[in-house]
Amino acid sequence: MNHPKSVAFLFAYVPKMPTSVEQLNQIEALRTQSAIVFRFAQKMNLNPPDRLPAVTTYRDGIFTRNATFKRAVDRARSQGSDLWLADIGHLLRKSSHANISKAMADLDSLQIDVIDCLSGKKWSEFELPERAAFSREALSRKVASLASGSIRKGQAPDIHNALKGASANRARAERKAEQLRPVVNRFRATLAPGDVITPSMLMRHLNAEGVSPERGKAWSLNSCKNLLQRLQGTKE
């Protein structure tokens, strides 16, 4: 049976707009999303989808209202195919708290199936607790940001203490990430040229190797995402 070719939308917030296709192709977030999409296609024994990437420097931009997203939706609808997003949770977590509900409402309103390639689920299959978790994470970031601003003005000593604790936790996590950098680099060296480590790949590898996470008994997708982000933020 022939399936209509799907369409994948890739999106990233960037500090500076790329000026060439080469620069666009080097954006790590897009490379990671592309790898997730490709592996999902392989897993489902489907042809790789048409990929439409977009980036923005505007932190308040909503990915579902990006012109390229709308073009991807139109193409998927006209082809009678699904719209693929590599990791819906990642895109929502990167959105501001005020915009998460708007993005989720936009996804709900689409007249096509939206597939989350990381989980293999349709967006319509995400339960209320999962959706609420995205909003809680964004709200926590907003509160931390506001609290940090208050500290700079000499306010809220109790929040200051909480932030000191959070800072210590971050430092501990960053030290753990640096300890694991050689492990991740050795795993990266086993991949084919051009392949990008995804959180799911790293999770399977670390758990198979018996590497202990900072918390809990086993590595999760989120803990591996965080590890990769920390290693990207602290280059060798």
Image (cartoon, rainbow, N blue to C red):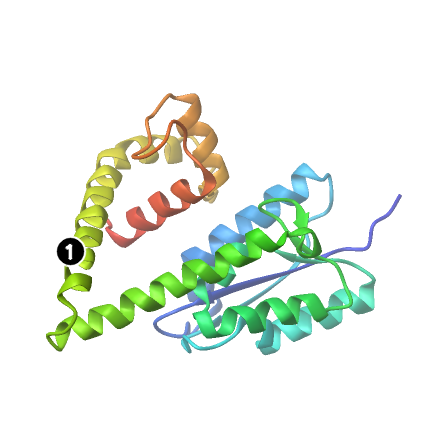
* Occupied quadrant, residue 18: bottom left
Q: Of the residues shown, which amino acid type is indicated by label 1?
A: Lys
Q: Residue at x 32, y 67 (%)?
A: 143
Residue situated furthest right in the rendering: 1
Decide: is 147 above or below 27. below
Residue hosting label 1 = 164
Image: 97 above or below 201: below
- Residue pictured at 32% horizontal, 27% vertical: 212
Dot 1 crowding, Cα within 10 Å, few <14, some 14–19, many 20+: few
Q: Nearer the viewer, residue 221 or 8?
A: 221
Residue shown at the point (67%, 68%) measured from the top left: 72
Res. 96 image quadrant: bottom left
Q: Quadrant of the N terminus?
A: top right
What residue occupies the far left of the structure in this picture?
154
Is residue 27 something that shows in the picture? no
In the rendered structure, the answer to whether residue 179 lies left or right of residue 45 reads left
- Look at the image and tell me whether residue 37 can be seen: yes
Residue 83's quadrant in the figure? bottom right
30 or 89, which is in the foreground? 89
* Place of residue 119 in the rendered image (x, y in percent of width and height, measured from the top left): 60, 44
Query: Where is residue 117 shown, x and y percent of the image?
Result: 62, 48
Label 1, secondary structure: give it: helix
* Residue 231 spot, x, y in % from top left: 29, 46
Spot occupied by residue 47 in the image (x, y as percentages of width and height): 72, 47
